[in-house]
Image (cartoon, rainbow, N blue to C red):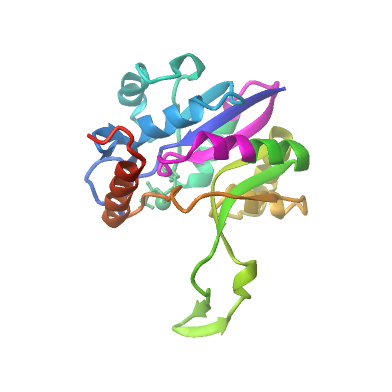
Amino acid sequence: MSTAALVLAAGRGERLGAGLPKALVSLAGVPLVVRAVEAIAAVPEIERVVPVVPPGELARFAALLSGVAGAHKLAPPVEGGRERQDSVRAGLASLADDTAWVAVHDAARALVRGADVSRVIAAARRHGAALLAVPLRDTMKRVRDGRVLETPPRAECWAAQTPQVFAARLLREALAKADAEGFLATDDAQLVERLGAPVAVVEGEVGNLKITTPEDLAAAEVLLRARGERAA
Ligand code: CTP
Ligand code: MG
């Protein structure tokens, strides 16, 4: 029963606006993709780690990742695509046929902790699919054209994170259905939900933030310092 992880690093990072692919941006001296790949490769249940990188960047990422901790688990980088879902498809297509479980992780969540990854893998093995998420602190409003449509009960609102872990066969089927229907999701669990399959929720940590804006990068530096890890 082999378990592989896709580390999605093919985004342009427009909201961060660093002038280079977000995965290459340094957090306390270490590029986000290096931090994310090392965190995922350190998880004992994960045997193979596939970095999915921006088109045209294979050589640069391969060189950057050659010396990471856990490099023996690392597959050569795969080129991603225009949309995140295209990158997932490319990563999934590169996996060996005997891959039973796939963890999909955003390189932008460079602070993920191994113990949380292990917990979500265990939940996926029980239920077929699982994701890390945190309960929302704010009340959520569905809004259209500047007006509130509805207020979902806050106790039922969680913010989805990654990794999201799936039986490989389930994720392949879910992606094929979405592609056939021209459906573009903002996370992978949504594709599996559309099959009517159960997706388990594992409570994660707010610190597993997605670095999206310069403010997030600054917050991540503070979190790292508080953890006492590899501050520059
Ligand atoms: N991603 C990807 N392929 C894409 C788009 C996104 O692999 N075509 C990855 C990003 O590299 C990131 C994760 O998906 O690790 C989450 O995406 P996001 O935070 O939106 O990153 P970017 O798309 O790079 O940022 P932006 O939307 O600001 O351009
Ligand atoms: Mg994006």
- Residue found at the far top of this picture: 72
Residue 5 placement (x, y as % from top left): 56, 30
Is residue 102 a member of the stretch shown in magenta? yes
Residue displayed at 63% across by 75% down: 153
Residue displayed at 43% across by 50% down: 209
Quadrant of the rendering where the C terminus is positioned: top left
Image quadrant where residue 67 sits: top left
Residue 4 placement (x, y as % from top left): 60, 27
Image quadrant where residue 185 sits: bottom right
Q: Is residue 67 left or right of residue 165?
A: left
- Residue found at the far bottom of this picture: 147
Residue displayed at 32% across by 37% down: 228
Give the mark count: 0
Q: Nearer the viewer, residue 112 or 162?
A: 112
Residue 207 shows in the view: yes
Q: Is residue 223 left or right of residue 95?
A: left
Residue 121 higher or lower than 68, as above or below: below
Residue displayed at 46% across by 40% down: 112
Residue 66 higher or lower than 61, as above or below: above
Residue 194 placement (x, y as % from top left): 71, 55
Residue 173 shows in the view: no
Residue 218 higher or lower than 48, as above or below: below
Quadrant of the rendering where the N terminus is positioned: top right
Residue 13 placement (x, y as % from top left): 33, 48
Q: Nearer the viewer, residue 92 or 114?
A: 114
Residue range in magenta is 93-119
Is residue 137 a member of the stretch shown in magenta? no
